[in-house]
Image (cartoon, rainbow, N blue to C red):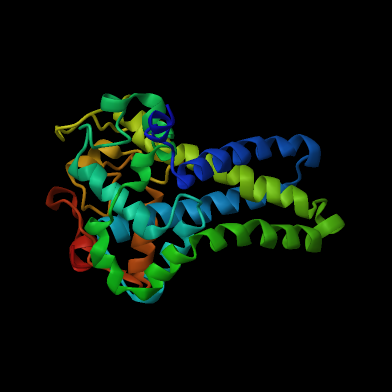
Amino acid sequence: MAEATQNVPRARPQVWSVIIGMTVFHLACLGAFYTGVSTAAIVAAIFMYVFRGIGVTAGFHRLLAHRSFKTNRVVQFILALMGSLAVQGGPLWWVAHHRHHHAATETEEDIHSPVTHGMWQAHMGWMMTDAAFNEKGTNSRDLHKFPEIKFLQRYYVWLVIAQPLILYGVGEWLGAAYNTSGLQLVVWGFFISTVFTWHVTFCVNSVCHRWGAQPYDADDASTNNVFIGYLGFGEGWHNNHHKFPSSARHGLEWWQLDLTWWLVRLMMLVGLASEPKIPKQFRKDGDAAAGA
């Protein structure tokens, strides 16, 4: 009996830390009923959502995972830092999982596919399994030449911990002058903003592989979902992305709002980005001049 008990698989400590951590984050959002809300709190929540969300879309996704445009190492580090603050894992871990998703889309190995594993698993359940920590990271070795990216991965947890401490200090400093408090900014700027960012990102894995338009045959269930396209800074044009995975521009039609691409274009205008990869049929003169 003792031997049989020893053979029962147990979740790794990382899995329990994710389960407990995500539960705490969701429950902490209820703190808004205690702290109330203010203009400063709303501004903090929106700022943190945009700042960190762009870090994920432009930094983790389009730059690090797909190398869809070029920039210098300082800008690369800043974008990767912004993404690391989103509480979605360190850059090397995030990139490894995303590249594996593209290599094994809708197969059993695609651990966040709603087609093979269901909506709950695709949306957030996959992070609460051992499989989330089985990725060896061999497909992200190209990023190991950047010690600053490895630094962000190594100290990722401390970057997470630092955020509520800084927000608390800012809230106390603003205090009565802006009708806020340290605790209020932590609840709105950290917990609520993080949870909202999570679910928009998760919807790309779940919703955008179930509901939406499929203008292209990408050999998978990816879709363009307008709702996630707008909320996710262009990431919801997921069928476009799976058809042209290396494209820096996901909103290929004029009406497909892609704020991440707008940022890349702005960076190009001031000399901070270059050589965006764009499907030939969607290039404009300015894109070609930029080296696309």
Q: Residue at x 53, y 45 (%)?
A: 17
Image coordinates for residue 220, horizontal then vertical, percent: 19, 31
Image coordinates for residue 267, horizontal then vertical, percent: 37, 67
In which quadrant of the rendered view does residue 113 lie? top left
Q: Is residue 61 visible in the rendered structure shown here?
A: no
Q: Could you tell me which quadrant the N terminus lies in? A: top left
Number of on-image labels: 0
Residue in the foreground of this view, choosing between 19 and 188: 19
Q: Residue at x 33, y 35 (%)?
A: 112
Q: Residue at x 38, y 52 (%)?
A: 57
Q: Could you tell me which quadrant the C terminus lies in? A: bottom left
- Looking at the picture, does residue 1 appear above or below residue 178? above
Q: Is residue 93 left or right of residue 86?
A: left
Image coordinates for residue 136, horizontal then vertical, percent: 28, 54
Image coordinates for residue 259, horizontal then vertical, percent: 40, 50
- Looking at the picture, does residue 211 appear above or below residue 174? above
- Looking at the picture, does residue 198 appear above or below residue 265? above
Residue in the foreground of this view, choosing between 265 and 191: 191
Residue in the foreground of this view, choosing between 230 and 155: 155
Q: Is residue 260 left or right of residue 82?
A: left
Q: Residue furthest right?
A: 176
- Looking at the picture, does residue 162 appear above or below residue 41? below
Residue in the foreground of this view, choosing between 130 and 264: 130
Q: Is residue 37 visible in the rendered structure shown here?
A: yes
